[in-house]
Image (cartoon, rainbow, N blue to C red):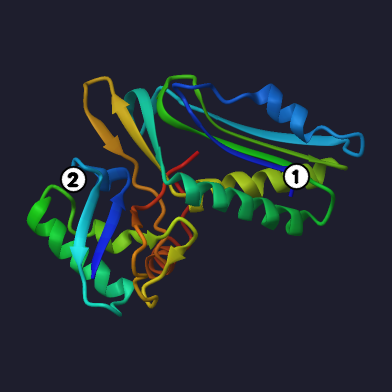
Amino acid sequence: MKIRIALYGALREADASGRVELEVPAGSSIAELRERLAAHLAGHAPAIPAGLVRRCAFASAEEILHNHRAVPEGVELAVLPPVSGG
Amino acid sequence: MDELHVAVVERRVAALDVAAALDFVGDPRFGGIATFIGRVRDHNVGRVVTGISYDLFEPLALRLFRAIGERARAEVGAPLKLWIAHAKGDLAIGDLAVVVAAGTPHRDEAFRACRLAIEAVKHEAPIWKQEHYVDGDSAWSEGCSLCEEQREAERLDHAGHAHGH
């Protein structure tokens, strides 16, 4: 299935459109999506530090999705680098 | 709850409004109001800063601000009015980045609610700060990971050290 992921903070610099689209098998976990995103960025955005995706969280508009969660179908996700508000 | 106001304000549209925050948390029942105002400063880690850009994942940030409000209410165990507003977009030195105001019957509750809310906003809300420097360079701040495994690893790693932001 195709997953659209919105990019924020330092990860915005990975793609001028502010999004990436990844293909993952149905039933994949967030941990698997994380690996897929890290591999995609290593190829398409080498300026992004390799360790950054490991420190990111994945989220829908409603909640943070931790590693063990299944990737929801038909929902745009967001990948959230370490936060620095305030 | 209608005693909680949360907002993300695009800087191009408006500045954060401290007077409106104080007005909102005022109440005849309340003898204490505590506020935290975060402003953009002109230096960080030895570099001259000329401005800041804030990026937010707005739907989740607003949801989290509301959750923080509920947590503060449970924590202080007293009537509470709380205002949480964060700026978005391009800010100049001196601009307001964040305003938290808490109104409660007594000062201790107000201080506690305000502190809890600003710390949670800084460490948990999906907000990213990009600093712009006088030499034309820009950098995203390091920040706190929201990934649970990573948070735990960093917590153990930083045990005994002061939190730098």
| Residue B80 percent coordinates (x, y) | 79, 46
Q: Position of residue B41 (x, y in %)?
A: 45, 25
The amino acid type of the residue labelled 2 equals Asp
Q: Which residue lies at the image location 75% right of the left edge and 54% below the top edge?
A: B73
Residue at image x 33%, y 31%?
B131
> Label 1, label 2: how many angstroms apart (C-alpha)?
40 Å
Question: Is disc 2 surrounded by few (<14), some (14 to 19) or many (20+) residues within 10 Å?
Answer: some
In percent of the image, x 52 and y 21: which residue is there?
A: B14
- Relative to residue B120, is residue A39 drawn left or right? left
Residue A57, image x, y percentages: 37, 61
Q: Quadrant of residue B155?
A: bottom left
Relative horizontal placement of residue A81, taking residue B65 as reference (left or right): left
Q: Furthest residue to the right?
A: B28
Vertical arrangement, residue A20 with respect to residue B41, above or below: below
- Indicate whether B74 appears above or below B7: below
Q: Secondary structure beneath disc 1?
A: loop
B123 vs B118, left or right, is left
User: Which mark, by number, is residue B130?
Assistant: none
Subunit bearing disc 2: A
Q: What residue is pinned by disc 2?
A: A15
Nearest the eye: A2 or B29? A2
Image quadrant where residue B18 sits = top right
Percent x, y for residue B145? 39, 57
Q: Disc 1 marks which amino acid? A: Asp
Few, some or many residues within 10 Å of mark 1 (<14, 14–19, 20+): few
Instruction: Name the residue at the front extreme.
Output: A74
Q: Secondary structure under badge 2?
A: loop
Residue in the foreground of this view, choosing between B93 and A41? A41
Residue to which mark 1 is pinned: B2
